[in-house]
Image (tube, grey):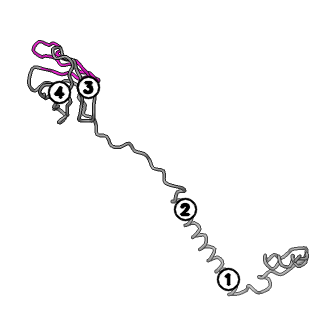
Amino acid sequence: MRLTRWTACNFFDQVSNLTMFCGKRSKSLRDSGFLTGNYANSLWGNIMSKTSKFLILAGIAVIVAGCQSSGPQKRVSVAPFEPVRIGIQGEWRATEGPLLAKFSGNKFQSINTENNQVVAAGAFKYNSDQNIRLDWVGALSGRSSADCRLVNRNLMSCVPSNGSGFTLQRV
């Protein structure tokens, strides 16, 4: 169905409350007396009340939407907790016998404290924070190794691959 110019102009005038359209004057709903007195004020109040309610709800929706994130949460990867390695760097004295072991870097030397001679020299590596592997060459015994455990910060107990166990105490 095709609207003529006159029909379209009249329709637009009634809907939009324009007073001038298509070159002729028409009455708006307010001018016609339809929206006068208490009815006009209550209708205008209802419109404003609904508008303000809508604006308040829209504002709350915007605030709530701002608190939400789009997509899945990004998780920050945190390294697993690792206890601080006590370490064996420094000097350790044998609890039995006149031996002093000096640990530095990943190497060590055992020195006879009576004559200040090197008895053994070797390397060590950590198997865990408390377990250390010692590998050395002794002046008299040749190649040897021992598995040691840090009992506490100042005491290390070792079990060699051959021979009897020994204990070292931090100096």
Residue 16 belongs to the span the image colors magenta: no
Mark 2, secondary structure of its residue: helix
Please, what is the three-letter code of the amino acid marked with disc 1?
Leu
Return the residue nearer the eye: 10 or 30. Answer: 10
Residue 6 position, x and y percent, is: 90, 78
Q: Residues within 10 Å of mark 4 (few under 14, many from 20)?
A: some
Q: Residue at x 13, y 25 (%)?
A: 163
Left or right: 31 with respect to 118?
right
Going from N to C along the chain, the mark reached first, 1 or 2, is 1
Residue 102 belongs to the span the image colors magenta: yes
Q: Which mark is residue 106?
A: none
Q: Which mark is residue 124?
A: 3
Q: Main secondary structure of the magenta part?
A: strand
Going from N to C along the chain, the mark reached first, 4 or 2, is 2
Left or right: 63 with respect to 113?
right
Q: Is residue 7 above or below residue 57?
A: below
Which residue bears the numbered disc 4?
160
Which residue bears the numbered disc 1?
43
Instruction: Say which quarter of the image contains residue 120.
Output: top left
Image quadrant in which the C terminus is located: top left
Instruction: Say which quarter of the image contains residue 37.
Output: bottom right
Going from N to C along the chain, the mark reached first, 3 or 4, is 3
